[in-house]
């Protein structure tokens, strides 16, 4: 009786769990963009790239937000890419990045394409991705070489290198020659490309002396300038701050014989005027690696739509990279030197460029206001290239604080709207919380103006609508300057079968409209880029504003505007047709180097009764460890259980449990008959739990290096230790690296059960050209019979090598062990 009650309790507990998982299974995983490599190319060229795909399917659409650029897929998706050794151990091994698959593609860039970022996205029947970034350049471009044994030579500078740090502890090195005395500037773009790396740059001279270095500790990318000497060679090295590496750690590294501009005073100019601008930078006056300044007359264009002028400062020491100068409609002034501590008096409206030349200093300005006057106060630093994180605080005539702001939405710049409670003099204080103040480069721009009656619209950047169902697109209206009129909404480019229903009007005074997107029952599973536009009238003026959405990437680390796009990606999607979960408990113990058949359960949904493809999931959980692998397997129709082979590598740590997730893939036609691939991932925290123990099989070579003699065979003694559970023979073979193929070989041998010593005989006939030490790997394999599922090889997702797949296809679970031997030739 106690046993029956216990089983009943388990069933009662399990039922809500299964119902919860069934609900969670209704949301398929969105496809994600891992990277694009190389991440940039020159205008007027066609660039061969690799797209890093996470949870993509063969029917995934690629959409470019700028129609002038095309991304054309070539071929099909490759296998999951496991990280390459060396591996992190302990807590550093937690939270691994996704395992991408790669798709070859071509990026076609027209010759008249301007320099700058191009955003792109993907969508499939499961959902939509965030945006990726490809950069169009206007100068010489080169791609990182696969040869890592010595620094890659850059033939001439200026040049931009597209590279990536694929492995932990990887360091990329580039060698170049300075043709003349003068500043050389090295600029790293990684974070702004969406890459998760924090870069470290070092420049060394021919004598290996450190010349300059820069470290990105804030995730904002870095730039360094050093004084080059004519005809001297320099080596520029790049690594990640924590020595991390992954296929997604892509970067663009520009090396230019030019100075670096870090600030402009004033930071803005009125449209249509010409005025003197003081540029502050490194090497811009004398070429020395010091902060100095020069003054230039700058003509500001009378261009209403434009918000900034990218100005290239020409100096005797080279042309600096473009530096942003804001375009303004306000009188622009510069903070005047003051001998007292009293606030500077401003006549409003006004804009002033100041600088916090004292560390953690504060500047105060005073202005007169009448009761109920409304003023918009903006303090900008990031948008003008300053390292400051500014704050704005308003004080009343009695000295009491009335309003304050640190970060406006989407930026670390400050902004607030202030209504004067009484007539009087008010102070606004500009401060900094970054710690980057203390020099003339620590500038800010304070602008105080009356709010203009206007509005702008904000929307999410992507949304999915299940076929035959509804979804809401929230459109937020940000009203400014007392604007209170109704706003008419229009949408252009909706996907086939999706319609915007209801009254497309934001009522007067309202701040939001939720547009219902209705998908017809016969909609195809497809996606498109949509423009959302608002029109309104204020006084005698018609206003038309395109909705903007925050996109992925870090183009300007603290500036919201540069990360906004004017397209919404809307996709028609389909419900998953399966639910997948691990049947076994988390108490499973698996030995190093062995293959564990994990029992997996699959429930078919929505009437689906076809085959189900089970694959490793791209986005593994925090306790996934590098090296865990599994094949693509097929669950035939009519079955709901299978044993999925999980291989645990010999180097696996025994300190903690491992976890491995799978995804179920089904082929289902959409209502228009187009075959779509639908994904279901293990819900919540469910995954295959593996507790790792010591290996069942170990081998060891000689404890000292062996001396090879030309034209004489070399005997390599191998000792074998194995568990009594392994009853079959041990297959010993030499794993020869590709570079030594054809020079070193050894016939494989089978060592019968009970034998603990064996000898591999190396053929050294063709080693006469080899010199020095070589490390070779000897591998041992024992095959255990197993009840395994049917493997699927055409899907191409499995990261396992051909040999491992052959073992599994033959019905065996391999147990592996390896040892490294050193041979002196």
Image (cartoon, grey):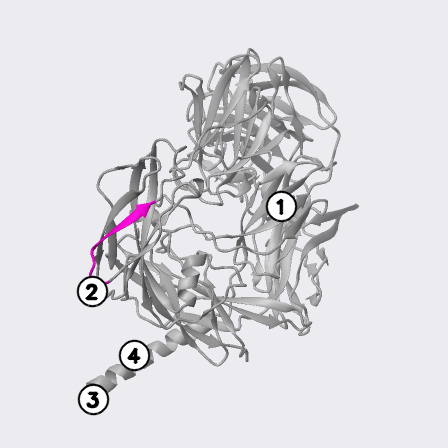
Q: Nearer the viewer, mark 2 or mark 1?
A: 2
Residue extending furthest front?
711
| Residue 26 visible within the image | yes
**Label 1 CA crowd tier, 10 Å (few <14, some 14–19, many 20+):** many
- x 46%, y 42%: residue: 166
Q: Mark 2 points at which residue?
A: 724
- Decide if residue 655 is in sight here: no
Say which label, 3 or 4, has the lower sequence index.
3
Vertical side of 752 occupied by 172: above or below: above
Q: In this view, does 3 lie to the left or right of 731?
A: left
Label whose residue precedes the other's in the sequence (2 or 3)? 3
In the rendered structure, does residue 755 fall within the stretch colored magenta? yes
Disc 4 marks which residue?
A: 10
The numbered disc on residue 752 is: none
Please say if 82 is above or below 23: above
How far apart are labels 3 and 1 at the CA level?
Answer: 65 Å
Instruction: Depth check: give the residue in front, 650 or 548.
Output: 650
Quick check: marks 1 and 4 in contact, CB under 8 Å? no
Disc with the residue nearer the chain's start (4 vs 2): 4
Give me the C-alpha separation between circle 2 and circle 3.
40 Å
Is there a contact, CB below 8 Å, between mark 3 and mark 1? Answer: no
Q: Residue furthest right?
A: 540
Percent of width and height locating residue 656? 27, 55
Residue lying at the far bottom of the rendered structure: 1
Count of numbered badges drawn on the protein: 4
Residue underneath mark 3: 1
Please tell me whether mark 4 or mark 2 is closer to you in this view: 2
Residue range corresponding to the magenta coloring: 753-762
Q: Is mark 1 on a helix, strand or loop?
A: strand
Tag 2 secondary structure: loop
User: What is the chief secondary structure element of the magenta stretch?
Assistant: strand
Badge 1 is on which residue? 119
């Amino acid at each position: 009786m106690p046993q029956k009650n216990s089983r009943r309790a388990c069933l009662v507990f399990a039922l809500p769990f299964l119902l919860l998982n069934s609900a969670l299974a209704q949301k398929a995983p969105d496809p994600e963009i891992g990277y694009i490599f190389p991440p940039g190319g020159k205008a007027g060229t066609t660039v061969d790239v690799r797209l890093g795909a996470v949870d993509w399917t063969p029917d995934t659409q690629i959409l470019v937000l700028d129609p002038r650029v095309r991304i054309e897929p070539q071929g099909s998706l490759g296998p999951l890419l496991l990280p390459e050794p060396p591996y992190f151990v302990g807590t550093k091994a937690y939270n691994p990045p996704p395992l991408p698959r790669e798709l070859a593609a071509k990026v076609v860039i027209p010759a008249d394409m301007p320099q700058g970022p191009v955003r792109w996205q993907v969508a499939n029947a499961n959902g939509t991705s965030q945006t990726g970034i490809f950069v169009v350049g206007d100068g010489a471009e080169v791609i990182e070489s696969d040869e890592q044994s010595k620094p890659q030579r850059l033939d001439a500078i200026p040049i931009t290198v597209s590279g990536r740090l694929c492995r932990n502890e990887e360091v990329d090195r580039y060698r170049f020659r300075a043709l003349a005395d003068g500043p050389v500037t090295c600029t790293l773009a990684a974070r702004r490309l969406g890459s998760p790396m924090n870069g470290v740059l070092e420049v060394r001279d021919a004598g290996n002396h450190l010349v300059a270095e820069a470290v990105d500790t804030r995730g904002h990318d870095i730039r360094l300038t050093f004084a080059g000497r004519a005809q001297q060679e320099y080596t520029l090295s790049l690594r990640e701050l924590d020595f991390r590496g992954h296929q997604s750690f892509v970067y663009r590294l520009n090396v230019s014989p030019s100075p670096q501009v870090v600030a402009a005073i004033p930071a803005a100019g009125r449209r249509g005027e010409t005025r003197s601008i003081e540029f502050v930078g490194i090497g811009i006056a004398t070429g020395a690696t010091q902060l100095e300044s020069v003054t230039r007359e700058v003509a500001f264009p009378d261009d209403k739509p434009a918000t900034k002028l990218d100005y290239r400062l020409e100096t005797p020491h080279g042309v600096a990279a473009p530096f942003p100068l804001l375009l303004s409609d306000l009188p622009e002034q510069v903070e005047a030197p003051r001998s007292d501590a009293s606030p500077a008096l401003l006549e409003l409206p006004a804009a002033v460029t100041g600088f916090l030349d004292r560390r953690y200093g504060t500047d105060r300005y005073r202005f007169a206001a009448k009761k109920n006057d409304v003023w918009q106060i903006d303090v900008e630093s990031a948008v003008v290239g300053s390292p400051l994180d500014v704050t704005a605080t308003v004080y009343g005539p009695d000295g009491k604080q009335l309003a304050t702001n640190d970060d406006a939405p989407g930026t670390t710049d400050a902004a607030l709207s202030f209504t004067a409670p009484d007539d009087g003099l008010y102070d606004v204080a500009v401060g900094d919380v970054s710690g980057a103040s203390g020099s003339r480069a620590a500038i800010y721009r304070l602008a105080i103006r009356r709010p203009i009656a206007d509005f702008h619209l904000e929307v999410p950047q992507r949304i999915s609508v299940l076929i035959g169902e509804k979804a809401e697109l929230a459109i937020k209206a940000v009203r400014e300057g007392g604007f209170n009129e109704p706003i008419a909404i229009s949408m252009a480019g909706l996907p086939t079968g999706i319609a915007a229903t209801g009254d497309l009007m934001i009522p007067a005074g309202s701040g939001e409209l939720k547009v219902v997107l209705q998908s017809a029952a016969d909609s195809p599973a497809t996606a498109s880029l949509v423009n959302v536009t608002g029109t309104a009238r204020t006084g005698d003026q018609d206003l038309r504003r395109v909705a903007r959405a925050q996109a992925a990437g870090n183009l300007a680390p603290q500036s919201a505007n540069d990360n906004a796009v004017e397209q919404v990606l809307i996709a028609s999607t389909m419900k998953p047709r399966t639910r997948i979960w691990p049947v076994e408990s988390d108490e499973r113990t698996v030995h190093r180097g062995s293959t564990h058949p994990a029992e997996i359960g699959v429930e078919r949904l929505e009437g689906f009764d076809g085959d189900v493809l089970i694959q490793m999931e791209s986005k593994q959980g925090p306790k996934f460890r590098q090296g865990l692998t599994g094949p693509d397997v097929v669950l035939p129709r009519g079955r709901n259980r299978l044993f999925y082979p999980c291989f645990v590598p010999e180097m696996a740590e025994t300190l903690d449990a491992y976890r491995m997730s799978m995804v179920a893939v089904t082929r289902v036609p959409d209502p228009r008959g187009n075959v779509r691939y639908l994904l279901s991932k293990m819900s919540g925290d469910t995954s295959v739990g593996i507790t790792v123990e010591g290996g069942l099989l170990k081998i060891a070579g000689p404890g000292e290096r062996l001396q090879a003699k030309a034209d004489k065979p070399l005997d390599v003694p191998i000792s074998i230790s194995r568990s009594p559970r392994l009853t079959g023979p041990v297959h010993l073979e030499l794993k020869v690296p590709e570079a030594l193929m054809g020079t070193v070989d050894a016939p494989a041998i089978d060592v019968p059960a009970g034998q603990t010593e064996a000898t591999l005989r190396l053929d050294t006939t063709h080693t006469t050209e080899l010199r020095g030490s070589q490390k070779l790997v000897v591998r041992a394999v024992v095959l255990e019979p197993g009840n395994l599922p049917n493997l699927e090889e055409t899907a191409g997702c499995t990261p396992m090598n051909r040999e491992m797949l052959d073992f599994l296809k033959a019905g065996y679970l391999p147990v592996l062990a390896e040892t490294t031997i050193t041979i002196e030739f």
